[in-house]
């Protein structure tokens, strides 16, 4: 598989339509039983709000660098306004329609010691007239997108799904459905449908054997007038089934932490990869890998292009090619990581010839937080600092080698003549939680330290491995 296709992710234009909701989490510790009833008392220490339902599908696409719009229904309430605020931060072009008489769908979970104590659902089903409002909005914006993804959670927003699919198909769009209804004929005309095994059985599918599964799947999609079925099968992986072919994809996860939102990740990845120009088989292969990454995380998780690239590299056992995120996308990914509560570590250097000292130093830097950003001097900057014979390796090659390290999440070049040879401006853009510098420095001497400290961050100085330096390596090479 050609990893260069991942550079086209921002060409995927996807409109998500469906049941949006607010996922709210109260986190706290449990130390006693209530004297009022035999239930645990949770002392809440933090509150976390996330985009849920169809909004989580859109979030997955945004985190994969796809261009995504979102249509859904919300109430005229604080939960709806909070959801809109979250979506704006996620860079999702949402057009949520307000229904004054009903509340925004919200699922509220109390979590203690990584266990869900109770879930509270705040919802009233939307009806046909409300869905008509979405249908009208869909007609207005459908031509701005190439793919239309319907995320059905059976909450009423897609009561007019038949008419919505017709609008999308008449506009020449590729249609994908994450279904909830057991009557698949409601989704007639869709190009892809992505039921899980339970939804497949409820729709009349037979999973008693591989032959029965294939035959019944083909019968269902033929009766419903659907192009293809991507059946997600938990530990058995996935199967892409059409009238003529069936391709199986083995599960790509060693240990499952949480399957919440895995279906959202699958259809979001599938759609984004199709939008980037991959073949259906390649798109499903990457969706399968993305699901393996997502279920290894807690909660409704998203997957980044970098994570997908690394997983793909392991999967194909290839080392000669590595995906590099376009530099202009990296700052957005860093902001997404911050929103997920991840601690960002920053360091910088020339890294002209990568050696053991660099590798150990970068691993130590990464251990200070969750994600490591490496600021990399560009070629002109190195020439000004080290002399006209440097760098030995050009910027793109140095960035590729660094990006291949497990400890490095992102590489960003700096050093334009107008900005100087220090990463101070880059550090101000990123505002990392921790700034790490290697060598014998005082904190006051480190570029960007003042900004990091002023914004509540930390600055650490780490020692380099004795005897390891690029200059020594170059000198030895010249001696020989």
Image (cartoon, rainbow, N blue to C red):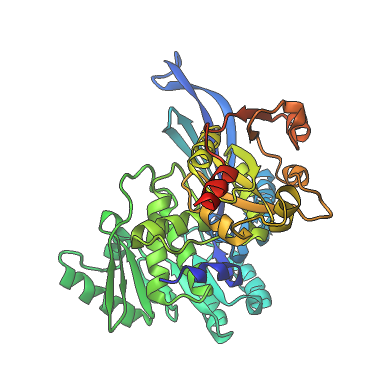
Image quadrant assignment for residue 45: top right
Residue 303 in the image: above or below residue 190? above
Percent from the top left, x then y, of residue 27?
A: 52, 30
Whether residue 316 is visible here, answered yes or no, is: yes
Q: Nearer the viewer, residue 18 or 65?
A: 65
Measuring from the top left, give residue 358's x and y in whole percent.
53, 41
Residue reaching furthest to the top: 35
Above or below 65: residue 475: above
At 55% from the left and 52% from the top, the residue drawn is: 478
Residue 48 image position (x, y, % from top left): 58, 37
Q: In the image, is residue 136 above or below residue 34?
A: below
> In terms of image quadrants, where is residue 391?
bottom right
Count of numbered labels shown in the rendering: 0
Whether residue 126 can be seen here: no
Residue drawn at x 43%, y 78% is 191
Image quarter where the N terminus lies is bottom left
Residue 349, percent across and down?
A: 64, 44
Horizontal side, residue 468 vs residue 453: left or right: left
**Vertical placement of 341 versus 130: above or below?**
above
Residue lying at the far right in this picture: please name it.
Answer: 418
Instruction: Judge by depth and name the residue closer to the eye, 301 or 373.
Output: 373
Q: Is residue 44 left or right of residue 187?
A: right
Of residue 453 and residue 447, the one placed in the foreground of this image is: 447
């Amino acid at each position: 598989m050609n990893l260069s296709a991942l550079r086209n992710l921002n060409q995927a234009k996807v409109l998500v339509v469906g049941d949006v909701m607010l996922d709210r989490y109260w986190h706290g510790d449990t130390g006693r039983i209530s004297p009022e009833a035999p239930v645990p008392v949770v002392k809440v220490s933090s509150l976390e709000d996330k985009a849920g339902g169809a909004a989580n599908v859109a979030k997955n696409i945004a985190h994969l660098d796809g261009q995504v719009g979102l249509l859904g229904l919300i109430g005229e309430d604080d939960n709806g306004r909070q959801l809109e605020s979250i979506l704006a931060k996620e860079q999702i072009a949402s057009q949520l329609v307000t229904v004054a008489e009903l509340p925004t769908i919200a699922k509220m979970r109390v979590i203690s010691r990584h266990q869900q104590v109770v879930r509270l659902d705040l919802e009233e089903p939307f009806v046909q007239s409300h869905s008509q409002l979405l249908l009208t909005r869909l007609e207005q914006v459908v031509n701005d997108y190439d793919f239309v993804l319907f995320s059905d959670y059976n909450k009423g927003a897609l009561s007019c799904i038949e008419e919505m699919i017709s609008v999308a198909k008449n506009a020449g769009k590729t249609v994908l459905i994450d279904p909830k209804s057991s009557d698949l004929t409601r989704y007639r005309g869709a190009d892809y449908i992505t039921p899980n095994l339970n939804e497949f059985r409820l729709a009349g599918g037979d999973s008693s054997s591989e032959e029965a599964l294939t035959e019944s799947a083909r019968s269902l999609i033929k009766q419903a007038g659907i192009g293809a079925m991507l059946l997600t099968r938990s530990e058995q992986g996935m199967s892409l089934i059409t009238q003529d072919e069936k391709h199986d994809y083995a599960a790509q996860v060693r240990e499952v932490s949480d399957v919440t939102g895995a279906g959202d990740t699958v259809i979001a990845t599938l759609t984004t990869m199709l939008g980037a120009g991959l073949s259906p088989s390649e798109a499903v292969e990457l969706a399968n890998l993305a699901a393996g990454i997502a279920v290894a995380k807690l909660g409704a998780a998203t997957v980044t292009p970098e994570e997908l690239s690394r997983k793909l590299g392991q999967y194909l056992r290839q080392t000669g090619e590595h995906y590099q995120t376009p530099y202009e996308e990296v700052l957005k990914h860093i902001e997404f990581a911050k929103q997920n509560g991840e601690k960002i570590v920053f360091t910088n250097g020339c890294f002209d010839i990568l050696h053991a000292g660099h590798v150990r130093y970068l691993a130590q830097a990464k251990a200070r937080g969750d994600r490591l950003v490496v600021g990399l001097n560009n070629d002109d900057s190195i020439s000004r600092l080290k002399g006209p014979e440097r760098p030995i390796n050009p910027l793109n090659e140095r960035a590729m080698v660094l990006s291949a390290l497990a400890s490095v999440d992102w590489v960003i070049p700096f050093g334009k003549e107008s900005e100087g040879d220090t990463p101070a401006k880059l550090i101000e853009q990123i505002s990392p939680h921790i700034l790490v510098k290697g060598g014998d420095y005082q904190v006051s001497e480190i570029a960007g330290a003042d900004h990091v400290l002023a914004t509540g961050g930390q600055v650490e100085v780490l020692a380099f491995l004795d005897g390891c330096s690029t200059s020594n390596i170059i000198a030895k090479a010249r001696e020989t």
